[in-house]
Image (cartoon, coloured by chain):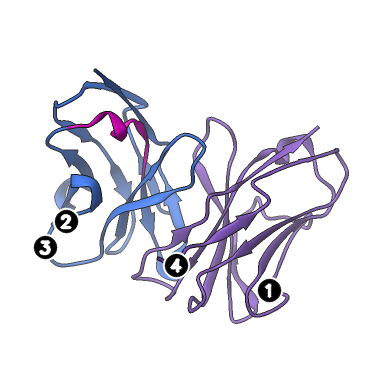
Amino acid sequence: EPEVTQTPSHQVTQMGQEVILRCVPISNHLYFYWYRQILGQKVEFLVSFYNNEISEKSEIFDDQFSVERPDGSNFTLKIRSTKLEDSAMYFCASSSQGSGTEAFFGQGTRLTVV
Amino acid sequence: AQSVTQPDIHITVSEGASLELRCNYSYGATPYLFWYVQSPGQGLQLLLKYFSGDTLVQGIKGFEAEFKRSQSSFNLRKPSVHWSDAAEYFCAVGAAGNKLTFGGGTRVLVKP
């Protein structure tokens, strides 16, 4: 069964460092998403991406964040200068359509900023 | 703006007993509704979804949910819980563009 894969599963980084979280969406999907879940809190939408551009972003997704689809398979989330409060589980998701279909989630990357 | 409320933070249920998890949503149009399950250290797995049609939807692992427009609810049920159902359950509403808004989650503990 096709699945969304994320790497690494756990990333520890020092405050102020840049991190790139990687995702390989399901191959025929066209819509891509990042969500995050701070420990003990709800899953929050960060950004959606379609046709090589951001289609929607939340207020969390400030200038420190960027997304990219550098080739035909990868979808990355970059945090330019990490802060302690960026520590969270980051989930990538993909869907075949923009609405009316389910999003498939990866296993997540746990980011710990120290 | 859309929102989802899961009133129960924790639920403890005995193995073999029935389970019902509550979900209330707020959304201006016809919602797309989802239930996801997250086992410890794992990602989010889709249990079931409602887009339109029959308001009682069947999902994986023996779960079902009923959409009640008049109550803005989408409660999840399972007739007989297994120990492996211990997990956190998230209700979500989807808008155009498939942006999901999640509830706070309900952690289910299963007693032997």
Which residue is at the front of the view, B2 or A64? A64
Residue B35 position in % (x across, y down)? 32, 49
Q: Quadrant of residue A100?
A: bottom left
Q: What stretch is highlighted in magenta?
A: B81-90
Q: Do labels 3 and 2 share a chain?
A: yes
Q: Residue at x 85, y 38 (%)?
A: A15
Q: According to the rendering, which colour does chain A have?
A: purple
- Judging from the image, mark 1 belongs to the subunit labelled A
Q: Do the residues labelled 3 and 2 touch (CB within 8 Å)?
A: yes
Of the two numbered discs 3 and 2 in the rendering, the one whose residue sits closer to the viewer: 2
Q: How far apart are marks 3 and 2 (CA)?
A: 7 Å
For the N terminus of chain A, the quadrant is bottom left
Regarding mark 1 in the picture, which secondary structure is present there? loop
Above or below residue B61? Residue B19 is above
Between the residue at mark 4 and the residue at mark 3, the CA separation in whole angstroms equals 28 Å
Few, some or many residues within 10 Å of mark 3 (<14, 14–19, 20+)? few
* Mark 4 neighbour density, 10 Å: few (under 14) some (14–19) many (20 or more): few
**Residue flagged by tag 3: what amino acid is it?**
Asp
Q: Mark 4 points at which residue?
A: A2
| Residue shown at 52% from the left, 76% from the top | A27
Return the x and y of residue A114 as percentages of the image width and height. 81, 32
**Which residue is tagged 2?**
B57
